[in-house]
Image (spheres, coloured by chain):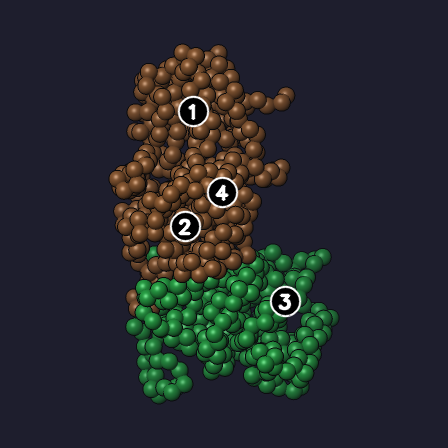
Chain colours: A brown, B green
Amino acid sequence: MGKRIGMEVGIAAAEAVGLCNIDVAAVYPITPQSHIAEHLSDIVHDGRIDAEFITVESEHSSISACAGASATGARVYTATSSQGLMYMHEILPIVSAMRLPVVMGNANRAVSGPLNIWNDHTDIMPQRDSGWIVMHAENGQEVIDMTIQSFKIAEHADVMLPTVLNMDGFQLTHMIEPLEFPTQAEVNKFLPDRVPYATLHPDKPMSMGCFNMPEIFTETLKAKDTALINSKKTIVKIWNEWEKQFGRAYKPVETYKTKGADTMILTMGSMGETASVAVDELRKAGKPIGLVKLRLWRPFPLEELRMAIKGCKTLIVMDRAVSFGGAGGPVATEIKSLLFHDKDRPRIVDFIMGLGGRDVTVENFIDMVARAGKKKDESYEYYGVRE
Amino acid sequence: MNTVQNFELYAPKLIEKREFFSSGHRACQGCGEVLGLRMIMKALGEDVVVSNATGCMEIISTAYPHTAWETPYIHVAFENAAAAVGSGVEAGLKALRRKGKIADRDVKSVAIAGDGGTVDIGLQSLSGAMERGHDMVFFCLDNEAYMNTGIQRSSATPFMAATTTSPAGKAIKGQRTGKKNVAEIMVAHNLAYVATACPSYPLDLMEKVKKAKAVKGPAYVHVYTVCPTGWRAASEQTIKLGRLVVETGIFPLYEVENGKYRLTMETPEPRRPVEDYLKLQGRFRHLDPSDVAKVQALVDKEYRKLMHKVKTSVPWS
């Protein structure tokens, strides 16, 4: 392990990719991902790694080029954000159906309408059903670690699925944090070369991406679902390997001061750090409050969540996206649905907040906990909205 | 592997005996596109990886678990597959070869799309791939409309042709615009090799495919392919229509090598009137003599433009 240095998280993400012996990167710049694109091209152009950097003309082409390159057996990386991810949307389920282990970094940013370049989760939520492994990093160190882990997870013979690592735009990507990088030798030890299941090469011709008639389409989709569900076991295994080698533990659902807590806040991404300060303050004031952080969004870690919220009476879900005209925020909606049959499930309070870069402070969390206590039903609520 | 029967009697020295696109696919009777594709694959040989856009050639050849492809093949989507996926394949093969992870020999990335996947929805990714200089060949198999979805117009549909979205109506008689000239757009990308071809001229087509493959860098071949189904033409007229389109000067066969234009198949002078070509197709059935004159005028203009380049262009290097 190298020494701790100060570095911007977006640049650190590119540095982490640089440690992973990638063969091809296809990246189109978009705020707030652009520092990843820029720094990765620096790494390639300076000859620090031996890889092809494809300066694609759009995100649609970056994910498409990644698909083509991955199908040849190459290790590939792309990064995007917001509109770019939306532009990729069409290709995402194809990449997962073809079982191509593309690794993506996504600098979370609001989806336009109106235009807004700041942070929320409205970009990743519409990709929920694409069949990708979806993970969220909370801080810069997690971005480094999880980027490296992503390649091992995606390419594992028991997984073979694309992964997207979410890192909150600006609030995380543009922070300068004290970070530790593993050495090249340590990464080489952790991350073996990709051993592709099938490749595009004349030595063994095969057809990829054949279309499915109704007689087989359902089976293909079920196979993808099964693969995604089964991937959790391998993800956890790889996280355990990481902990063994590097000493930092990763779990599908992280908890903070949940022991004895009857009320818990649930977050995804960088917001967890602020929420933990709020929990500290509330605990100091004698309130039994805990924090639950979803690291893994797909496959959804239901069992781990059940364990994490044991004894919880009120679960306050922080949603940074909303399904308009529907049941509320996607995270709360999903948790409500999954826990529907659980006899002693907590009351679930759904706050929609932190949209388009709106700051959510420690005081806001404390306020939301107070409001949640008074709420009579489980309808969703926009927190802090100006009426 | 499929082979042609009695092949030795016909063209043993000129044409690759092996078939890289096998029979048993689901193309329509008289399909000129699959004929062109078969010739392209013969001329390319085995050391290729094909990226194919969604379209007729994809759906007739890859109904899981069947495939007509004897070479490595990938289909991803419609607008990107050919150019962007092809870029990725090229980059992947290049990196893996350099790093000693695959065999150390040339394998060409080949992208194939229909006219919709090239001139309309795929134009951006095509332009990007060609501009970036990937070592790849792009083939547009142009049957002048979205045939796979039921004969809707594309920007490759010729002037006045009736399609299901440019119907021959009482107020508007078919396609209102002329054909977008993507070969010219490709020349403007400074490609070392751009050509037009037609399977009615098989040796000319295969020669161009070989030249395009030999280029170190991007090359583009625009292949005119007759669609009897979509053009409302008799399926036995495919080869004839391919000849007439050249003899009328509607689709001249030429190549552009480093900026130098050359007709590879001389058009007879005087050129045959466009009517000879139009009258064999139901898509032009609604044209009256004055309409035919308009089509003739447009063809004359485009032909003059091309011939000016043939006469005056000089190679860049």
Marks 2 and 3: which is nearer the front? Answer: 2
> Which quarter of the figure is the C terminus of chain B placed in?
bottom right
Per the rendering, the mark at residue A17 is: 2
Circle 3 residue: B179
Q: Which badge, 2 or 4, comes first in the chain's sequence?
A: 4
Q: Nearer the viewer, residue A140 or A93?
A: A140
Same chain letter for marks 4 and 3:
no
Residue under the point 47% across and 43% down: A7
Residue under the point 44% across and 68% down: B110
Residue under the point 53% across and 59% down: B125
| Circle 2/circle 3 CB separation < 8 Å | no
Query: Is residue B52 visible in this depiction of the protein?
Result: no
Identity, as a three-letter code, of the amino acid under mark 2: Val
Q: CA distance from mark 2 to mark 3?
A: 45 Å
Circle 1 residue: A276
Q: CA distance from mark 4 to mark 1?
A: 22 Å
> Which quarter of the figure is the N terminus of chain B placed in?
bottom left
| Residue A86 in picture, x, y percent from top left | 52, 44
Marks 2 and 4: which is nearer the front? Answer: 4
- SS for callout 3: loop
Quadrant in the rendering for residue A70 = bottom left
